Image (cartoon, rainbow, N blue to C red):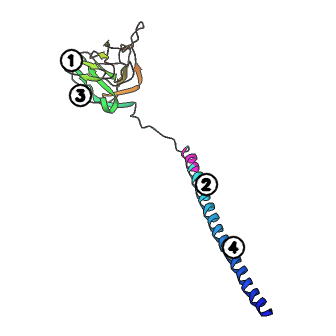
Amino acid sequence: MAASKKGGAVSGGSLIERIKAALRAEDREEQVKIQSRRRLVGLLTGGFLTANFLMFLRFFFPRTIFEPRTQFRIGLTTDFAIGVDTRFQKSNRIWVVRTTDRLFVIFASCTHLGCTPDWKLSEAKFKCPCHGSGYDPEGRNYEGPAPRPMDRAYVALDPQGRIVVDTSVLYREEKGQPTQFDSPGSFIQV
């Protein structure tokens, strides 16, 4: 009986050992799952914090808009024939207009909503494609919703005789007020 107890104890002990080993194996699997979940949560948290840190750093690098210079030279007065010259419409948003006695620069912006009108050579007028405002060759409005004529830019001659335009200085003609179109700097006498 002692042998059977011993055998039973041995076999019973091995059964307990097997159960303990199985429990330890399950514990290891559970630990691996927990570590895997912890790693995933850690990676997600780290990614979130990194993205927020990069967004924070972005504020130190301001966004800039590169606009054309407001002061520039366009050539000599002899480079322009009588009429409207559209060479600088895309690059500087201006038209150069030469009459028999004056040369002036119209800033190419509709006074209604700021669209860029087109020069219609066949009709001899500026026509805004947005809402149909019409302007004569001198930039004065005569049709459509535009409230006033287009602005004129400052224009002068440098010491070499080249035309200098400054679009940061604009001359206006408001209804009921004296015109600025005859002010010094709004045209060049030719």
Mark earlier in primary sequence (2, 3): 2
Number of other residues with Cα within 10 Å of mark 2, as a class: few under 14, some 14 to 19, many 20 or more: few
User: Nearer the viewer's eye, disc 2 or disc 3?
Assistant: 2
- Residue holding disc 3: 79
Farthest residue toward the left?
Answer: 122
Instruction: Return the x and y of residue 78 as percentages of the image width and height.
Output: 23, 26
Q: Which segment did they paint magenta? A: 52-58
State the separation of the CA atoms marked 1 and 3: 24 Å
Residue 51 drawn in magenta: no
Task: Inspect this view and state whether residue 62 appears.
Answer: yes
- Amino acid type indicated by mark 1: Glu
SS state under label 3:
helix
Q: Residues within 10 Å of mark 1 (few under 14, many from 20)?
A: few
Give the foreground label among 1 and 4.
4
- Split into 4 quadrants, where in the image is the N terminus? bottom right
Residue occupying image coordinates x 74% and y 90%: 7
Mark positioned earlier in the residue sequence (1 or 4):
4
Dot 4: what SS? helix
Image-based side of 66 in relation to 75, left or right: right
In front: label 2 or label 4: 4
Kind of residue sitting beneath label 2 = Thr
Q: Whole-Å distance between the Cαs marked 1 and 4?
A: 95 Å
